[in-house]
Image (cartoon, rainbow, N blue to C red):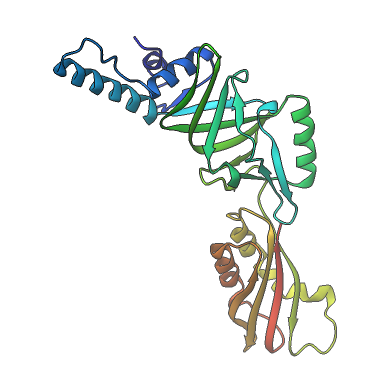
Amino acid sequence: MPLLAILLLAAAPGQDVVQLTQKSQLKELCEALRAQPSESNLDPAQLAAARKAAKARRDEAAEHWYRVEVPSKGFAFGLYRAQDQQIELDGDRPLRAIDDMLVLDLEGIDDVSFNARAEQVATWNQQKKAKALKLVVVFKPAGDRCAGSAAAESWRIAGRARSWELTGAQGIVAAANEDGEPVGGNGPRQVRVEKVTLDSDDTPQDNEGRSRLSSTQRALDRCATGAHRAGKLLVSFSVQNGRVREPQVIMDSLRDESISACVAKAISGTEMYGTGHGTAAISVQ
């Protein structure tokens, strides 16, 4: 029985991911992805059957998801975006795994980033130097695109990922989805009202007017639970009959329409003293 079939049979019920950990697995996978029949001494009927069997082998290998652990030396971090509190993967460097025998060329690696505070990045870099941080990728091969040989003990596989995880001694520390967008790993986001001003203000407000929206804090924090990055919002509104009306987000560094719509809805109708046009500077941290 082919090694790939044995691996799949050994997987837990309902498990659709093959754990890719050994050189023998790489050899079997690469051979399966580029399987071609030997056409010598075959009559037309035998050749058609052989081609069909080779295609079935390629299709079976390509339809599964594979999980591979990339060691600390097999990946690199790129730019740290302090404003967004995100660290990028270095997409210019291919991933190397399984004792440096596997090179992965994955679609969208240039767009992968993880939520991270500055102190977390410093810790992760220390862990990388100590070889204690890994990148775990679940990917699917891109058809028969496989290069390399068993003789050279080197294989190169192209594909696309459905998940990216940074793991340390304590488990997963950060993750990104199939689009490379960060998910979890940095604790829940929080919203801070930085400043609220109104046309009717004739003297400076205590706490820069932040207390005017204090009753909306829980609703605002709920809006931030889905935020992929940190950023700032500037909201314009009017106060009519003591309540906030027609809030509109006029500046959004989060670049997330769902979050800005949620924030506008959260402050709409809030009781507020004063009159006229107003603005609220709000940050997501």
Residue at horizontal 59 percent and vertical 26 percent from the top: 69
Q: Residue 122 placed where, x, y %?
A: 80, 39
Count every numbered label the image shows and give the total.
0
The reply, left or right, for residue 52 in relation to residue 174 is left
Residue at horizontal 38 percent and vertical 29 percent from the top: 62
Q: Residue 220 placed where, x, y %?
A: 63, 64
> Which of the image's four quarters has the C terminus?
bottom right
Residue at horizontal 82 percent and vertical 90 percent from the top: 202
Figure quadrant of residue 283: bottom right
> Which of the image's four quarters has the N terminus?
top left
Residue sitting at the far front = 40
Position of residue 111 relative to residue 161, above or below, is below
The reply, left or right, for residue 137 in relation to residue 238 is left
Depth order, front residue of 241/136: 136
Residue at horizontal 63 percent and vertical 77 percent from the top: 270
Does any portion of residue 70 appear in the rendered image? yes
Position of residue 266 relative to residue 180, above or below, is below
Position of residue 87 relative to residue 168, above or below, is below
Does any portion of residue 169 appear in the rendered image? no
The reply, left or right, for residue 9 in relation to residue 190 is left
Depth order, front residue of 15/25: 25
Q: Residue 65 placed where, x, y %?
A: 44, 30
Q: Residue 284 placed where, x, y %?
A: 69, 60
